[in-house]
Each structure stands twice: as structure tokens, then as C-alpha cells.
Image: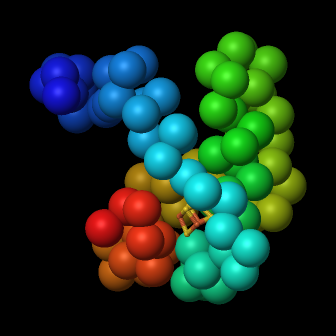
Amino acid sequence: MAMKNNDGSLTAAQLQAELNRCEYCEEKPCQVACPADCSLADFIIAARMGAPSDYRRAGALIMGANPLGWVCGVVCPGLLLHEGMCAPHV
Ligand code: SF4
């Protein structure tokens, strides 16, 4: 897989690969593990097609559920929470 961008963010190809990994689990263990009750599956599916409007819709889902979504996205210890509960991710 390609290296990350210089700022540590995922390349477009890496982001798409990550979005494609979600299996939209019926039980949504990622949401259960999120202290803010954010549905990762819903915003992943919203963003999956990769158009700017898809990312805006995904962002609206996040911010609608959690007004601190931007901050949480930066400070969230994901491996200890939702990523640790996601079977395709581990
Ligand atoms: S646990 Fe992982 S695969 Fe399942 S819905 Fe959440 S993000 Fe998608």
C-alpha cells in the first residue's frame, strides 16, 4: 500500500480502501463502542462513493450526532474503542 501523505493523512487510495472495508454490521459494534454514540457505519457508507457531496453528507451525519465530531476525530483513541470492535479492521 502507498505511503501516507506528508501530513500523516491517508492518500485518496488508502481512504477508499478503508471505506470499502466496512461490512455495515447489523449490530454496529463500532457505534456501541463510541462514547458519543456516533454511527461510523452510517458515515462510512455515506462517504463510500467519494464525491464531494458524499463527504459533505458524511460530515453532516457526524456533526449531527456529535457537535464535537471534529475534535473527537482528532483525539479519539480509536484502537481502544471503535476500531478495536471492528472485525474487518483488526
Ligand atoms: S464494526 Fe467495522 S465493519 Fe462493522 S459496521 Fe462498524 S465500521 Fe463497519
Give the vertical position of 36 relative to 24 (above or below): below
Give the vertical position of 89 relative to 33 (above or below): above
Q: Position of residue 30 (x, y in %)?
A: 57, 73
Viewer-closest of 38 and 7: 38
As drawn, is 45 to the left or to the right of 22?
A: right
Q: Position of residue 5 (x, y in %)?
A: 23, 21
Quadrant of the rendering where the C terminus is positioned:
bottom left
Image point 68% across, 59% down: which residue?
24
Viewer-closest of 60 and 51: 51
Query: Where is residue 8, by image quadrant?
Result: top left
Q: Is residue 39 visible?
A: yes
Q: Position of residue 85 (x, y in %)?
A: 45, 79
Rendering quadrant holding ligand 1: bottom right
Image point 34% across, 29% down: which residue?
14
Furthest residue in direction top, as rendered: 51
Quadrant of the rendering where the N terminus is positioned:
top left
As drawn, is 6 to the left or to the right of 62?
A: left
Image point 70% across, 15% down: which residue?
51
As drawn, is 19 to the left or to the right of 38?
A: left
Query: Where is residue 35, by image quadrant?
Result: bottom right
Image point 66% across, 68% down: which residue?
25
